[in-house]
Protein backbone atom coordinates (compact mmCIF):
# COMPACT_ATOMS: atom_id res chain seq x y z
CA UNK A 1 0.00 0.00 0.00
CA UNK A 2 1.39 3.39 -0.92
CA UNK A 3 0.79 6.70 0.78
CA UNK A 4 -1.76 8.79 -1.07
CA UNK A 5 -0.98 12.23 -2.52
CA UNK A 6 -0.88 15.06 0.01
CA UNK A 7 -4.10 16.81 1.11
CA UNK A 8 -3.10 20.04 -0.67
CA UNK A 9 -2.90 18.15 -3.98
CA UNK A 10 -6.05 16.03 -3.62
CA UNK A 11 -8.27 18.70 -2.04
CA UNK A 12 -6.73 22.16 -2.54
CA UNK A 13 -10.08 23.95 -2.11
CA UNK A 14 -10.27 22.75 1.51
CA UNK A 15 -6.53 22.48 2.36
CA UNK A 16 -4.59 25.69 1.79
CA UNK A 17 -0.93 26.18 2.66
CA UNK A 18 -0.47 29.25 4.87
CA UNK A 19 3.28 28.83 5.40
CA UNK A 20 5.95 26.32 4.46
CA UNK A 21 9.69 25.99 5.01
CA UNK A 22 12.17 23.13 5.52
CA UNK A 23 10.79 22.46 9.04
CA UNK A 24 7.00 22.76 8.85
CA UNK A 25 4.03 23.06 6.54
CA UNK A 26 1.11 25.05 8.02
CA UNK A 27 -2.26 24.34 6.43
CA UNK A 28 -5.68 25.78 7.09
CA UNK A 29 -8.46 23.32 6.34
CA UNK A 30 -11.91 24.87 5.90
CA UNK A 31 -15.11 23.32 4.61
CA UNK A 32 -18.86 23.46 5.11
CA UNK A 33 -21.47 20.82 5.91
CA UNK A 34 -21.58 18.06 3.29
CA UNK A 35 -18.00 18.52 2.04
CA UNK A 36 -16.19 15.31 1.14
CA UNK A 37 -12.40 15.16 0.96
CA UNK A 38 -10.98 12.25 -1.05
CA UNK A 39 -8.29 9.90 0.27
CA UNK A 40 -5.10 11.88 0.96
CA UNK A 41 -2.03 11.91 3.22
CA UNK A 42 -0.63 14.04 6.02
CA UNK A 43 2.75 14.15 7.75
CA UNK A 44 3.01 13.95 11.56
CA UNK A 45 1.26 17.09 12.75
CA UNK A 46 -0.27 19.27 15.40
CA UNK A 47 -3.98 19.97 14.82
CA UNK A 48 -5.66 23.06 16.29
CA UNK A 49 -9.46 23.05 16.00
CA UNK A 50 -11.02 26.48 15.52
CA UNK A 51 -14.56 25.47 14.53
CA UNK A 52 -17.26 23.02 15.54
CA UNK A 53 -18.16 20.05 13.40
CA UNK A 54 -18.54 16.31 13.07
CA UNK A 55 -16.60 14.27 10.50
CA UNK A 56 -16.81 10.72 9.30
CA UNK A 57 -13.15 9.73 8.80
CA UNK A 58 -12.27 6.74 6.62
CA UNK A 59 -8.81 5.16 6.92
CA UNK A 60 -6.90 3.61 4.03
CA UNK A 61 -7.98 0.12 5.19
CA UNK A 62 -11.68 1.09 4.92
CA UNK A 63 -12.45 1.40 8.62
CA UNK A 64 -14.36 4.51 9.72
CA UNK A 65 -14.58 6.68 12.81
CA UNK A 66 -16.81 9.60 13.77
CA UNK A 67 -14.72 12.55 14.99
CA UNK A 68 -16.12 15.59 16.78
CA UNK A 69 -14.27 18.86 16.16
CA UNK A 70 -14.42 21.22 19.14
CA UNK A 71 -12.99 24.76 19.25
CA UNK A 72 -9.72 24.94 21.17
CA UNK A 73 -9.00 21.20 21.04
CA UNK A 74 -5.37 20.47 20.21
CA UNK A 75 -4.29 17.05 18.91
CA UNK A 76 -0.79 15.67 18.20
CA UNK A 77 -0.62 13.03 15.46
CA UNK A 78 2.60 10.97 15.84
CA UNK A 79 2.76 9.34 12.41
CA UNK A 80 2.03 10.11 8.78
CA UNK A 81 -1.32 8.68 7.68
CA UNK A 82 -3.84 8.40 4.84
CA UNK A 83 -7.52 9.19 5.25
CA UNK A 84 -10.60 10.70 3.65
CA UNK A 85 -13.38 12.55 5.41
CA UNK A 86 -16.95 13.72 5.05
CA UNK A 87 -18.31 16.64 7.05
CA UNK A 88 -21.56 15.44 8.63
CA UNK A 89 -22.38 18.61 10.64
CA UNK A 90 -21.00 22.06 11.34
CA UNK A 91 -17.88 23.45 9.70
CA UNK A 92 -14.28 22.32 9.42
CA UNK A 93 -11.92 25.08 10.48
CA UNK A 94 -8.60 23.66 11.63
CA UNK A 95 -4.96 24.68 11.45
CA UNK A 96 -2.60 21.78 10.73
CA UNK A 97 1.10 22.16 11.51
CA UNK A 98 2.87 19.30 9.74
CA UNK A 99 6.31 18.71 11.23
CA UNK A 100 8.70 17.58 8.50
CA UNK A 101 11.45 16.56 10.93
CA UNK A 102 9.00 14.14 12.62
CA UNK A 103 8.46 12.26 9.35
CA UNK A 104 10.44 9.17 8.43
CA UNK A 105 12.68 9.44 5.34
CA UNK A 106 10.64 9.44 2.15
CA UNK A 107 7.42 10.73 3.72
CA UNK A 108 7.95 14.43 3.00
CA UNK A 109 6.29 15.29 -0.28
CA UNK A 110 5.87 18.60 -2.06
CA UNK A 111 2.58 20.44 -1.63
CA UNK A 112 2.35 21.82 -5.14
CA UNK A 113 0.51 19.97 -7.93
CA UNK A 114 2.79 17.93 -10.16
CA UNK A 115 5.59 17.73 -7.60
CA UNK A 116 4.09 14.96 -5.46
CA UNK A 117 6.57 12.13 -4.82
CA UNK A 118 5.26 8.77 -3.52
CA UNK A 119 6.63 7.36 -0.28
CA UNK A 120 6.33 4.15 1.69
CA UNK A 121 3.86 4.11 4.62
CA UNK A 122 5.22 4.25 8.17
CA UNK A 123 2.88 1.60 9.58
CA UNK A 124 -0.75 0.66 9.79
CA UNK A 125 -2.73 3.86 9.15
CA UNK A 126 -5.47 3.17 11.69
CA UNK A 127 -3.07 2.10 14.43
CA UNK A 128 -0.90 5.16 13.84
CA UNK A 129 -3.72 7.49 14.89
CA UNK A 130 -2.17 7.90 18.34
CA UNK A 131 -2.61 11.34 19.79
CA UNK A 132 -2.87 13.42 22.87
CA UNK A 133 -5.76 15.84 23.09
CA UNK A 134 -6.10 18.92 25.23
CA UNK A 135 -8.99 21.33 25.43
CA UNK A 136 -8.72 24.73 27.11
CA UNK A 137 -10.18 24.95 30.62
Image: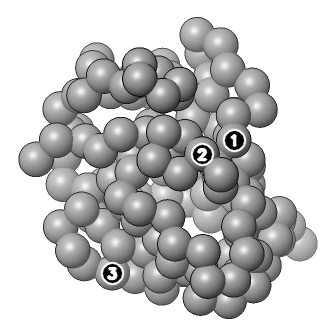
User: Residue 66: x and y, percent?
Assistant: 48, 85
Q: Residue furthest top?
A: 22
Q: At x 77% / y 32%, what residue is drawn?
A: 18
The residue singled out by tag 1 in the image is: 16
How has the structure been colored for display?
one colour
Dot 3 falls on a residue whose secondary structure is strand
Q: Nearer the viewer, mark 2 or mark 3?
A: 2
- Residue 118 figure quarter: top left
Q: CA distance from mark 3 to mark 1?
A: 25 Å
Dot 2 falls on a residue whose secondary structure is loop
User: Residue 137: x and y, percent?
Assistant: 89, 72
Count neighbours of disc 2 (C-alpha within 10 A) and say few if under 14, some if 14 to 19, many if 20 or more: some
Q: Which mark is residue 64?
A: 3
Residue contact at pointers 1 and 2, CB within 8 angstroms = yes
Q: Nearer the viewer, mark 3 or mark 1?
A: 1
Dot 1 falls on a residue whose secondary structure is strand
Amino acid sequence: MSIQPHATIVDPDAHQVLFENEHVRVIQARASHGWESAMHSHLPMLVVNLGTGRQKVTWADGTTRIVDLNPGAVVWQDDAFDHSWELLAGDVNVVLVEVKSAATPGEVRQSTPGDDVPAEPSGDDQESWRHRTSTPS
